[in-house]
Amino acid sequence: MSKISYYTEEGLKHMKDELFQMEAVERPAISKLIGEAIDKGDLSENAEYDAAKEAQGLLEMKIAKLRGVIVNARIIDDTNIDNSKAYILSTVKIKHAVNGNEMIYTLVAENEADVKANKISIDSPIGKGLLGKSIGDIAEVVTPNGMIQFEIIEITR
């Protein structure tokens, strides 16, 4: 059974664009490299041919995996999502309980996570800790260095 995953329209479009790039640009380029390597003759000792075939195999695996993700992707309708709790697509302002640092993160699907853009996966330790929490709640996040507590200050869409 395949796993259904939820994405924003932007995130799903990005994955479809990536799939198109692999199928329409990268696949023909690798096929061309294989053809050039074949034209050079003896394939038994042709490192260029072996490398191109390996690259082709890796690309086909990536294409198959991404197709599976796209087939099982669902777009999130955030119009009816309750803002009183942190869910996927929530933007959550949190405060570190010990040092008082404040951070703002948007909770997204794993494939859309981008720490530079303050988008964290709901499957990350912080994302898991924030899910379902309300303003004023303390989220306990398990990290390799131990438990960290964050206070939920604000939740928006």
Image: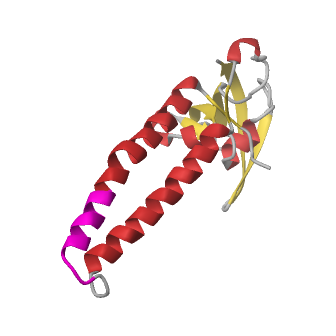
Where residue 11 sits, quadrant-wise, is top right
Majority secondary structure of magenta residues? helix
Query: As rendered, which of 117 and 7 lies closer to the eye?
Result: 7
Tell me: residue 1, above or below residue 89: below
Quarter of the rendering occupied by the C terminus: top right
The answer to whether residue 12 is magenta is no
Q: Residue at x 55, y 35 (%)?
A: 119
| In the foreground, 101 or 15 | 15
Check the image and name the residue furthest to the bottom: 45
Q: Is residue 41 above or below residue 100?
A: below
> Looking at the image, is 133 positioned above or below residue 44?
above
- Residue 57 percent coordinates (x, y): 46, 65
**Quarter occupied by residue 128:** top right
Residue 19 in percent (x, y) is at 47, 42
Q: Residue at x 50, y 29 (%)?
A: 13
Residue at 30% across, 66% down: 34
Residue 143 x, y percent position in the rendering = 68, 56
The range drawn in magenta is: 30-42
Residue extending furthest top? 79
Q: Is residue 110 visible?
A: no
In this orientation, does residue 152 appear? yes
Relative horizontal placement of residue 44, taking residue 92 as reference (left or right): left
The location of residue 40, given as percent across then percent down, is 18, 76
